[in-house]
Image: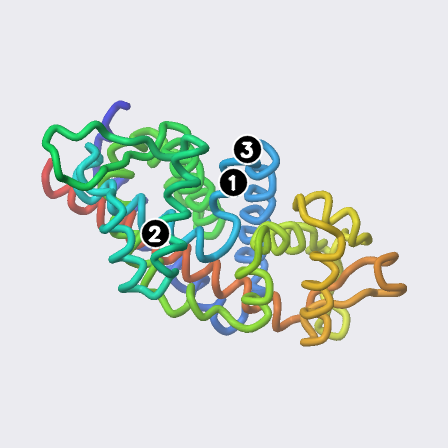
Amino acid sequence: MMGLHYNSSAARALEPDVVRHDRLAMAALDPFDPVFSEALQRLAQAFVATHQAEPRIAALFATEQRWLLCHAALGAHFRTGGIGRGLTRPVLVEMSDRYAIASRNTVHAFIDEALKYDFVRLVTLRRPGGHHRFVPSPKVIGMLAHWYGLHFEALDVIDGGSRAGLFRADADSLLLQMQPDVADGLLAAPGIRNSGPLYATFSRVDAGGLIMDRLFGGIDLTIPATFDRYETDITSISFLASFAGLSRAHVSRKLSAAEAAGGVGWSGLRGRSPLWISHDFRRQYAQTQATKLSILDDAFSRALAVRAEAS
């Protein structure tokens, strides 16, 4: 892709913005700032649309654990220039151990599945006795670039910036610079790994993140909250199960657990009326997204600063 040309106005557009920092910091205290809420809902809806367009590859990110392993693997790949030297089983196992993501057996099973579905590809070794090396397939790199673009669109909603367009103009090069930094930030951030009990009820089970995105993307922001409850457009457990590709019993159990903790509930008859989300659940979801957006934006700013100094 063509490289970016930097000038003073472009540099100013990419520096950490006071408005952006204020709104992301505000999300830690009040996740219901109108502009931040709009950006958050757009992001959730974009995640849902991405899953519907590419369900198999989106399933690679189905749980928080798998999502973290994906970022660790992609960070290892790009850390050595993205030429097939950085991603091996021992490297991913070491990163998983360092950040307490998963057991060694789980890491190996994750790689085996990624190979089976052509999410990663084996690199031919030039010398015997070395570890097998892997590279992400083009469709995974494309999904990663799309994921970055969605988050930059959300940040642009918050402060009127132009990150998404600038990123997409040179995504290949910027991914190379940013992904190791982003992976380290996501793996180490307490706001990602400890995002609250209501959030964890969904994030640690299959398709739980997708269910949350569908719930939060379905809030009608024009309707004021009633008793700190935010009504969604979900009225059926069967619909939510079919949408997420899960059994009705599985989704019902997760909703029941969240309901018992006060995170969700039904406006009328259970499973036959709009599902609502509590203030605390929405706050935990918003804070997690705000942490992720800050990590991405800071990495983007650092990458651009390095490139500006080199130009």
- Which residue, given by chain and number where applicable, does mark 1 sit on? 58
Secondary element at image label 1: helix
- Which residue, given by chain and number where applicable, does mark 3 sit on? 54
Query: Which quadrant: the N terminus?
Result: top left
Q: Amino acid at mark 3?
A: Glu
Secondary element at image label 2: helix
Residue 199 lies, with reference to residue 182, above or below; the image says: below
Q: Amino acid at mark 2?
A: Asp
- Look at the image and tell me whether residue 217 can be seen: yes
How dense is the environment of label 2, judged by Cα within 10 Å: few (below 14), some, or many (20 and up)? many
Given residues 251 and 190, the one toward you in this image is 251
Q: In the drawing, what numbered circle is on residue 238?
A: none
Given residues 132 and 279, the one toward you in this image is 132
- Which residue, given by chain and number where applicable, does mark 2 sit on? 297
How dense is the environment of label 1, judged by Cα within 10 Å: few (below 14), some, or many (20 and up)? some
Secondary element at image label 3: loop
**CA distance for labels 2 and 1:** 23 Å
Tell me if 143 is positioned left or right of 183 in this view.
Answer: right
Query: Which quadrant: the C terminus?
Result: top left
Q: Estimate the x, y position of residue 257 in percent, counting from the top left.
A: 68, 70
Tell me if 137 is positioned left or right of 273 in this view.
Answer: left
